[in-house]
């Protein structure tokens, strides 16, 4: 990632099936692999607004319908009345803003202190640092979310147990995560876009994820396979880059940010692959046991 040095293997436990990156950078060293141009840090910062005026910006009444149809299910949450929400890995606070507009009281945790400060500057209560050092909240949460974050944790079970203690009885946990049991994982192997070593410490299948969540005190309620082909397109980009086609490769590697309306054309295939659990990304709902 980011042309930084290092060579890493992925090893698999023959007993439980859990896969992890080996060697793994220590918690003190991992910050080196999150440079300023790390993708989530580049999300545009927007000011906190409590009034949801998004509908005024729609040029057509068809747009919300299309958004619902083509929603990739990447940040799907259970249908809940507004309460208290924690986002682990909140970056500069874009999703926190989104949930505030829906009436939620929000807090965040962000590994980068610099990026956490950006979220604090627009009014959010955000801990800068890893989950392991985050202080106990004043009140428990009804919903905890983590979008592409669990795979980054050094000690996922300890992290999940910590979140368990912070959750109200019956609280929900919503996670998005790469699926190491997907077709793209075996097809592209070391060119796999979702591997993202070494920042992805663990590589989960639905089966191994269920075991890890259970050990952390959470029980899976639902798994959604996201309707997106970003893993496949990014993996092709890595292949093209290694063959010397850098300019073309960059367009594939940046597709998740710049794909635009082309995403709609790919929807039939992504929808079909999602039915069979092979888009490479999943959104999981779990509940406090």
Image (cartoon, helix red, strand yellow):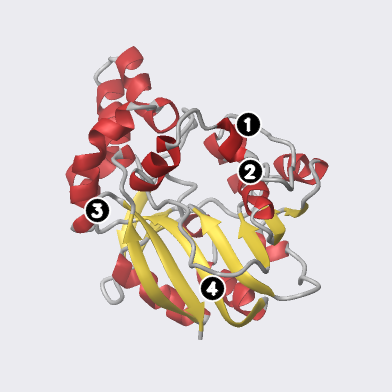
- Label 1 neighbour load within 10 Å: few <14, some 14-19, many 20+: few
Position of residue 75 relative to residue 134, above or below, is above
Give the Cα distance between marks 2 and 1. 8 Å
Give x and y (percent) for residue 251: 36, 20
Give SS at disc 3.
helix
In this rendering, would 88 be left or right of 258? Answer: right
Residue 206 lies in quadrant: bottom left
Give the Cα distance between marks 1 and 4. 28 Å
Question: If you read the primary sequence from the N terminus, does the residue marked by circle 2 or circle 1 appear first?
Answer: 1
Which residue in the structure is indicated by mark 2? 94
Position of residue 81 relative to residue 243, above or below, is below
Give the Cα distance between marks 3 and 2. 26 Å
Q: Residue at coordinates 56% horizontally, 61% vertically from top-left? A: 145
Which residue in the structure is indicated by mark 4? 172
Quadrant housing the N terminus? top left
Question: If you read the primary sequence from the N terminus, does the residue marked by circle 1 or circle 4 appear first?
Answer: 1
The numbered mark at residue 44 is 1
């Amino acid at each position: 990632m980011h042309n930084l040095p290092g060579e890493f293997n992925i090893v698999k436990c023959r007993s439980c099936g859990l896969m992890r990156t080996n060697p793994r950078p220590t918690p003190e060293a991992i910050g080196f692999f999150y440079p300023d141009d790390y993708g989530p840090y580049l999300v545009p910062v927007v000011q906190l607004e409590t009034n949801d005026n998004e509908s005024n910006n729609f040029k057509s009444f068809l747009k919300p319908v299309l958004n619902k149809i083509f929603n990739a299910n990447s940040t799907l949450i259970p249908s809940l009345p507004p309460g208290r929400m924690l986002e682990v890995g909140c970056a500069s606070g874009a999703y926190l803003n989104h949930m505030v507009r829906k009436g939620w009281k929000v807090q965040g945790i962000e590994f980068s202190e610099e990026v956490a400060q950006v979220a604090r500057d627009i009014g959010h209560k955000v801990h800068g640092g890893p989950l392991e050092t985050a202080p106990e909240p004043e009140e428990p949460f009804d919903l905890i979310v983590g979008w592409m974050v669990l795979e980054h944790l050094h000690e996922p079970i300890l992290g999940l147990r910590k979140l368990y203690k912070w959750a109200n009885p019956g609280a929900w946990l919503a996670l998005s995560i790469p699926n190491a049991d997907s077709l793209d994982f075996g097809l592209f192997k070391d060119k796999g876009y979702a591997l993202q070593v070494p920042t992805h410490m663990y590589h989960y299948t639905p089966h191994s994820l269920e075991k890890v969540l259970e050990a952390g005190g959470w029980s899976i309620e639902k798994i959604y396979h996201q309707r997106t082909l970003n893993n496949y397109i990014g993996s092709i980009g890595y292949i093209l880059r290694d063959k010397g086609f850098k300019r073309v490769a960059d367009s594939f590697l940046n597709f998740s940010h710049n794909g635009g309306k082309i995403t709609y054309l790919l929807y039939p295939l992504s929808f079909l692959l999602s039915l069979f659990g092979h888009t490479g990304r999943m959104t999981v709902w779990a509940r406090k046991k």
